[in-house]
Amino acid sequence: MTDCLFCKIAAGEIPCNKVYEDEDFLAFNDINPKAPVHVLVIPKHHLASLNDADEQDVGLLGLLMDATRKVARELGVDNPGYRVILNVGKGGGQEVFHIHVHILGGKILPF
Amino acid sequence: MTDCLFCKIAAGEIPCNKVYEDEDFLAFNDINPKAPVHVLVIPKHHLASLNDADEQDVGLLGLLMDATRKVARELGVDNPGYRVILNVGKGGGQEVFHIHVHILGGKILPF
């Protein structure tokens, strides 16, 4: 996975503005924020995208969403709320092919 | 859960434009679509929002994401891709407090 930007960030080889870390997940500020709070949550384990998940990744996906919930609470955006976005594939706007969850918050988000 | 719109849809008490169903999940077209394909994926089990999840819901969250992946593939939006959105809390744009995943696709989605 030496060519994967987020694997390198997870390994500490490339710096990030870290806001959360546990054994399996890492969260850091998006370098091009779209909201006052814009954080990416990634698993340290490499999975290219939701499209590439299979049955054995279901546990990872659940833990990724649970980590997202925890990070949002730690950031204080859980009340009044936040938006969770996964861009899947190039047509979905995915730019880095290591699965990542965007947390957007810090303002009211009309839909 | 008699007051929950999506519990009523899951129970078949209120009609929906269904695109997918299995034992635990249901997907149907959003009544106010924001893209050529705009589908909601819900668990039949009631959980108000990601904010309300706890440790025992991690399995459900993983299966919800896996169902989302399957629905996107069945809809044919997995290539070139799609966007997955969860609005969490009123400030995040959540309107129905039964957790649901938006799948947006059918056009290129800039981010």
Image (tube, coloured by chain):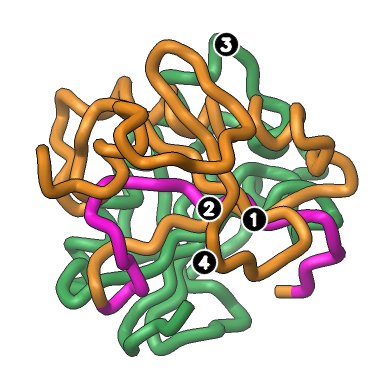
Chain colours: A green, B orange
Q: Quadrant of residue A73?
A: bottom left
Instruction: Name the spot of residue A30 as percent of width and height, x first.
Output: 54, 73
**Which subunit holds the residue at mark 3?**
A
User: Mark 3 vs mark 1: same chain?
Assistant: no
Q: Can residue A95 be seen in this view?
A: no
Q: In which quarter of the image is residue B55?
A: top left
Residue displayed at 55% across by 56% down: B30
Nearer the camera: disc 2 or disc 4: 2
Image mark for residue A85:
none
Instruction: Name the spot of residue B12 as percent of width and height, x first.
Output: 36, 29
Front in this rendered view, residue A27 or B23: B23
| Mark 2 and mark 4: Cα distance apart in space | 29 Å
Range drawn in magenta: B91-110
Residue displayed at 56% across by 68% down: B32
Task: Let me know if residue A81 is in the magenta part.
Answer: no
Q: For this view, does A20 lie left or right of residue B18? A: left
First-in-chain label (1 vs 2):
1
Q: Mark 1 points at which residue?
A: B38
| Mark 4 and mark 1: Cα distance apart in space | 34 Å
User: Mark 1 vs mark 2: same chain?
Assistant: yes
Q: In which quadrant is the N terminus of chain B drawn?
A: top left
Q: Name the residue under label 2.
A: B102
Q: For this view, does B111 lie left or right of residue B78? A: left
- Report the amino acid beneath label 2: His
Image mark for residue A16:
4
Q: Is residue B38 above or below residue A29?
A: above
Q: Name the residue under label 3.
A: A55
Front in this rendered view, residue B87 or A15: B87
Q: For this view, does A107 lie left or right of residue B57? A: right
User: Mark 4 vs mark 3: same chain?
Assistant: yes
